[in-house]
Image (cartoon, helix red, strand yellow):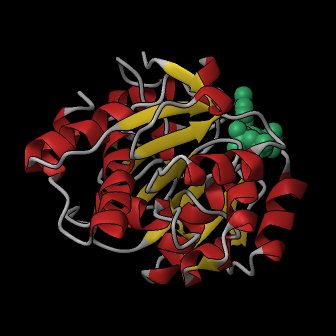
């Protein structure tokens, strides 16, 4: 667990992740491992920021000399509004998870992190079912659509999925049942795993060559992945995406290749 600083008492440091809550974030460990691997003299801390205080906190950290900030739940939209310059992907998603403080330039590396986490996977075709319509879903839809996937979206509250598709101009097909048949990839973006809940999916209908992907992760398989695995599907949890979004953030700040192996090892 991280030592957590309130933003008004943040120490002099180079980088930070801000969120609420923030004590379980793995970003300090992962980025510190990257700095050590490359012999960079830099520090990275966890800073607690309450909703509504993001803009004030970013101003204060900038004045303190922080170079870069990662932003996690629930602050990515407020962070986007603070930035003076944003990349096209963050404009499309209207959220920032990575900021260069001096230039007030922000980006979002979640979609890239998700795409890269799948880059080496041997899919035979590109048909995906995405479950959920929460904070992380839009980055996943954007990544899949950019790579030509045919995407269906299911959410427990269908109206929320419909408004997400409309708001972000996604072409995914809204479905009222999470039908697994024919899909090569099934992505769980809901927070059901975090509360130990199961989604109403019938794994016996899944293509046995499909990959089940849960953005959540824990010390053991999430209920979603454990069920998928018992039906013979390959599984992937959210750790690789976490590493890849962190590696893309590192590259945004340092303009050099991130040490992915060491960053991944820090998450085990
Ligand atoms: P927010 O909705 O505030 O962005 P989130 O944690 O990013 O919060 O999103 C929660 C997602 O997980 C939603 O898609 C939610 O479904 P609803 O829109 O129907 O609430 C989904 N979710 C959480 N618990 C779930 C459960 N037990 N079963 C199915 N879906 C669940």
Question: Is residue 205 something one can see in this rendering?
Answer: yes
| Residue drawn at (37%, 34%) of the image | 28
In the image, 260: left or right of 145? left
Residue 1 vertical placement versus 208 (above, below): above
| Residue drawn at (35%, 64%) of the image | 253
Quadrant for the C terminus, please: top left
Residue 220 vertical placement versus 38 (above, below): above
Where on the picture, by quarter, is residue 228?
top left
Question: Is residue 228 something one can see in this rendering?
Answer: no
Camera-side residue of 108 and 145: 108
Residue 118: percent from left, percent from top: 30, 61
| Residue drawn at (86%, 65%) of the image | 163
In the image, 97: left or right of 1? right
Residue 201 vertical placement versus 223 (above, below): below
Q: Quadrant of ligand 1?
A: top right
In the image, 89: left or right of 161? left
In the image, 193: left or right of 40? right
The number of numbered discs placed on residues in the rendered structure image is 0
Residue 113: percent from left, percent from top: 39, 60
Quadrant for the N terminus, please: top left
| Residue drawn at (22%, 32%) of the image | 266
Camera-side residue of 149 and 168: 168
Residue 121: percent from left, percent from top: 23, 61
Residue 88: percent from left, percent from top: 57, 84
Camera-side residue of 111 and 266: 266
Residue 137 vertical placement versus 46 (above, below): below
């Amino acid at each position: 667990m991280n030592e957590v600083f309130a933003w008004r008492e943040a120490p002099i440091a180079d980088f930070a992740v801000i969120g609420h809550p923030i004590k379980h974030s793995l970003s300090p460990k992962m980025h510190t491992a990257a700095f050590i691997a490359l012999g960079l003299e830099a520090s990275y801390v966890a800073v607690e920021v309450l909703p509504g205080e993001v803009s004030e906190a970013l101003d204060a950290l900038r004045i303190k000399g922080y170079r870069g900030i990662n932003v996690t739940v629930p602050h990515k939209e407020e962070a986007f509004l603070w930035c003076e310059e944003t990349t096209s992907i963050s404009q499309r998603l209207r959220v920032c998870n990575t900021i260069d403080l001096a230039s007030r330039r922000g980006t979002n590396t979640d979609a890239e992190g998700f795409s890269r986490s799948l880059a080496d996977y041997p899919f035979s075709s590109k048909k995906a079912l995405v479950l959920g319509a929460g904070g992380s879903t839009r980055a996943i839809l954007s990544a899949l659509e950019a790579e030509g996937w045919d995407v269906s979206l299911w959410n427990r509250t269908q109206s929320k999925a419909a408004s997400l598709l409309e708001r972000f101009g996604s072409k995914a097909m809204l479905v009222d049942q999470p039908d697994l048949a024919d899909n090569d990839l099934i992505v769980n973006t809901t927070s059901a795993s975090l509360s130990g809940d199961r989604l109403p999916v019938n794994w016996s209908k899944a293509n046995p060559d499909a990959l089940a992907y849960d953005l959540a992760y824990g010390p053991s398989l999430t209920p979603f992945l454990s069920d998928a695995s018992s039906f013979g599907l390959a599984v992937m949890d959210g750790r690789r995406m976490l590493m890849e979004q962190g590696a893309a953030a590192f590259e945004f700040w340092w303009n050099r290749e991130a040490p992915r192996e060491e960053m991944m090892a820090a998450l085990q």
